Image (cartoon, grey):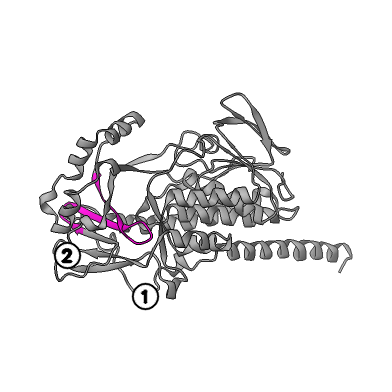
Amino acid sequence: MLSTPPTRVAIIGAGLSGLTLAIALHRQGIACTIYELRQPSVSSSGALILSPNALRILDTLGLYSRLSPQGYSFETIAYKNHEEATTDRYYLGDEKTYGYKALRVYRQILLTELRAMAKQLQIPITYGVKFSHVVSEDDKGVSFAFVDGTVSSADILIGADGIHSTVRKYVAPGVFPKYSGQVAITCAIPLSKLEFPDGVEYDLPVGIHGKNGAFVMAPQNTDGSEVLAGTQRAYPEQDRAGWDALLANKDGLLALFQTGMEDWPQLVKSALNNVPVDTLAIWPYYVVPKLERWFSPANRVIILGDAAHAIPPTAGQGASQGFEDVFTLAALLPSLSQKMPLGKAVTYWNNMRQKRVDKVIELTLQLNNTRLPQAEREKLEAGQTWVSGESGELGWLYNANVEEDVLAWIKTETKVARTCPVDWLATKLQGK
């Protein structure tokens, strides 16, 4: 049983969660090594939204000031109906209430900045190696192998290897991602190609909700001159080759994207009539079924981020919850001691994180339901779709200081362990 802070942590995956974890561990004085299959020359497409809870973590790690000048800052996404009247606004950030505006940034920019900081901190990353399996796990550590036959070891092995995690096969054998039945189709279009109606206020980003569901338009570069435009469609599940084939068939994908175009207002039609075909992309929505736990029976193999709880992007919380995972785990590991063994620590961490992720998933489902086709939305009961309430209602999500919560729990647990049992036993032995 590990009862001292780990000195050798291995991370599988040099994506957003893996790199951020390594930086957070370095901040705590814990050394780690990252192993990644893809070479850093492989670019990552698309953009993502970082909400205040994620930006607070990145700010603490010294990354926010690097990222904010390279992204598009905003506060709300407007919800419009088919007549293009604004029916609601969802806050993805609010500087006055939550400390930060939301930031939409290209995924590649975020990866580049994370890699640059990891290099600056001299965190070793081994590229071109594919994790195979855990060889053994005991009180002395964990041994693990790669496909090329090499074997390595560490005090703790952490799987940050995404929704199709190989490390998860060891922690939760037989659990596989589940397809939601929906695929997002998007493109990147110049703002100048969009035809906005006269006399209608059109703040971006916006979600237009109509007969076909929701069509979203969101600026994704610094000056807002490039806009992501997209919607989601029901589509049968494919294997990897099938999804690749759908993406490769640009004419067929465009036709699917434009299905029902006549039912959209003119702004959406202008987007669909000016799609840069080479920017067409798909995102099949997969989720990871709720796991019994995120760590192995001997506690030394841990999964986090999408490997543990892939969340659809509707609430902008996929990457954000991954950052919360790594930041809280990094805060917890230095506290390991005889009074705070690894098993107790990771059990608390897992339960605390699962409770929060469950609440985020509930919110995400409400937001997803607002994007359903009109006929399906009308079948839902009250409370199953998102409707804004009072100002600051997302404070539980955006204003949480997750590191402070962990440190407060550690302080309480170690204080109890230090003062109660020993003093009580000493009194009994003295016959008092």
Rendering coords of residue 318 (x, y %) = 43, 52
- Mark 2 packing: few (<14 Cα in 10 Å), some, or many (20+)? some
Residue 35: give x, y in percent of width and height: 58, 38
| Residue topped by disc 1 | 391
Find disc 2 in the rendering and name its residue: 84
Among the two numbered marks 1 and 2 on one chain, the one whose residue lies closer to the N terminus: 2
Quadrant, the C terminus: bottom right
Chief SS of the magenta region: strand
SS for callout 2: loop
The residue sitting at 25% across, 33% down in the picture is: 249
Indicate the quadrant containing the N terminus: top left, top right, bottom left or bottom right.
top right
Mark 1 and mark 2: span between their CA atoms?
24 Å
Residue located 60% across and 66% down the image: 404
Q: Hey, what amino acid is under mark 2?
A: Glu
State the extent of the magenta-drawn residues as a range: 209-233
Query: Which picture quadrant has residue 211?
Result: bottom left
